[in-house]
Image: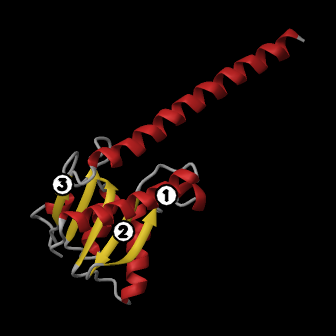
Amino acid sequence: MNYTQEEKEYFMNQALTEAKKSLEKDEIPIGCVIVKDGQIIGRGHNAREELNQAIMHAEVMAIQEANRVEGNWRLLDTTLFVTIEPCVMCSGAIGLARIPHVVYGATNQKFGAAGSLYDILTDERLNHRVEVETGLLEDSCAQIMQDFFRQRREKQKVEKEALKAQQGTVSDS
């Protein structure tokens, strides 16, 4: 699990590739990969809207795939790379899967549970603690999120203006 900086950046770029899959489906662009012995054994991206399931976060999808690949619910000797700091649910899933190492790109000031709002992964009251590394390709990981939300706000503004214009046309008739 001692990866070089170059290897870590490669895996985080793979997580960014997963995030772009979410982006293509108008989902919040978060991506994740789980690595064991230098090989990706699980991939995931946000798919809540696509699958109409609140729990379909990138980390959960990657954990499910890694469980299938390993044939085990315990993901020992693995590293999870995710573009954004895990939320409470995902931090819980990471702990329950016994993933020992998490690397994330950008913090999540609104929902983060790996150091921002909460610190579930390193909480000494829990029976499993995770080594956490932050800030890997932080600018790229934050930028994809910022772009998504900026475009979403612009789209909502255009839709709102179009609705107003349409309502104005209807009332003029």
Q: Tell me the tag on residue 119.
A: 3
Asked whether the beta carbons under mark 3 and mark 2 sit within 8 Å of each other, the answer is no
Q: Describe the colour scheme in one phrase.
A: secondary structure
Secondary structure beneath dot 3 equals loop
Q: Please name the residue that numbered disc 1 is placed on.
A: 54
Residue farthest toward the bottom in the current orientation of the protein? 71
Q: Is residue 57 visible?
A: no
The residue carrying pointer 1 sits among few (fewer than 14), some (14 to 19) or many (20 or more) residues within 10 Å by Cα, namely few
Q: Nearer the viewer, mark 3 or mark 2?
A: 2
Identify whether 125 is placed above or below 24.
Answer: below
Residue 49: x, y in percent? 57, 54
Residue farthest toward the right in the current orientation of the protein? 173
Gap in Å between the C-alphas at discs 3 and 2?
21 Å
Residue 62: x, y in percent? 40, 71
Identify whether 130 is placed above or below 168.
Answer: below
Residue farthest toward the top in the current orientation of the protein? 172
26 lies left or right of 31 = right
Asked whether the beta carbons under mark 3 and mark 1 sit within 8 Å of each other, the answer is no
Q: Nearer the viewer, mark 2 or mark 1?
A: 2
